[in-house]
Image (tube, rainbow, N blue to C red):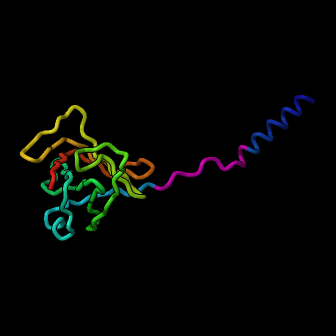
Amino acid sequence: MRRTAFGIALGLVFVLAACSKGAPPPPPPQPDLHPEAIDYQVMKTSNLFGAGCNFAAEGGGLGALVLAQEKEAIIKLEGKIVRLPADKASRLLSDFARTRYADGSRILILAPIPGTLPAEIGQIQSLPTKLAIIDTVGRPLFSAKGQVQCKAM
């Protein structure tokens, strides 16, 4: 009798396990981002001047991929200016910018490369930095190494 009860109980466990839904599937992957350089002409026509830091990727020319300011970071995607609000709880990158910015679909992180020191060139402070843009789940959308240059304007 005990064997029969045990067999029925064990069978019910397998039936219930087969009927359970399990974990929901992960969200679909986000497409890779391709930030475009923000050159002087775009800065002028979009009135993007102000104190802050510019991130330029290694080998990417003089155009900045990110304009990081006190209240927002600005990137250019598919020809359009995109503004990401500053995460006010994030660490300061300089007196004029932060290390983390986020909107509802992506997070932008400017991380100084450990073991490197900033260089002062006149009024400009330059620091080796890694740029990472991830989705809200933490999946990478874009990354690059380069220089952050900060200046009060």
Query: Which residue is drawn at the image coordinates 21% and 69% (left, top)?
Result: 46
**Percent position of residue 119, x then y:** 12, 39
Is residue 70 or residue 5 the one in the foreground? 70
Is any part of residue 17 visible from this angle? yes
Is residue 23 or residue 50 the one in the foreground? 50
Is residue 55 or residue 36 the one in the foreground? 55
Query: In the rendered view of the protein, which quadrant contains the C terminus?
Result: bottom left
**Percent position of residue 72, x then y:** 30, 57
Most prominent secondary structure in the magenta stretch?
A: loop
Query: Which residue is drawn at the image coordinates 25% and 47% (left, top)?
Result: 144
**Percent position of residue 93, x then y:** 25, 44
Query: Which residue is drawn at the image coordinates 27% and 53% (left, top)?
Result: 70
Q: In this view, does 128 lie above or below 59?
A: above
Task: Write down the quadrant of residue 17 in the picture.
Answer: top right
Q: Is residue 72 above or below residue 148?
A: below
**Residue 24 as seen in the image, left or right of residue 115:** right
Q: Does the magenta stretch include residue 129?
A: no
The range drawn in magenta is 17-28
Query: In the rendered view of the protein, which quadrant contains the N terminus?
Result: top right
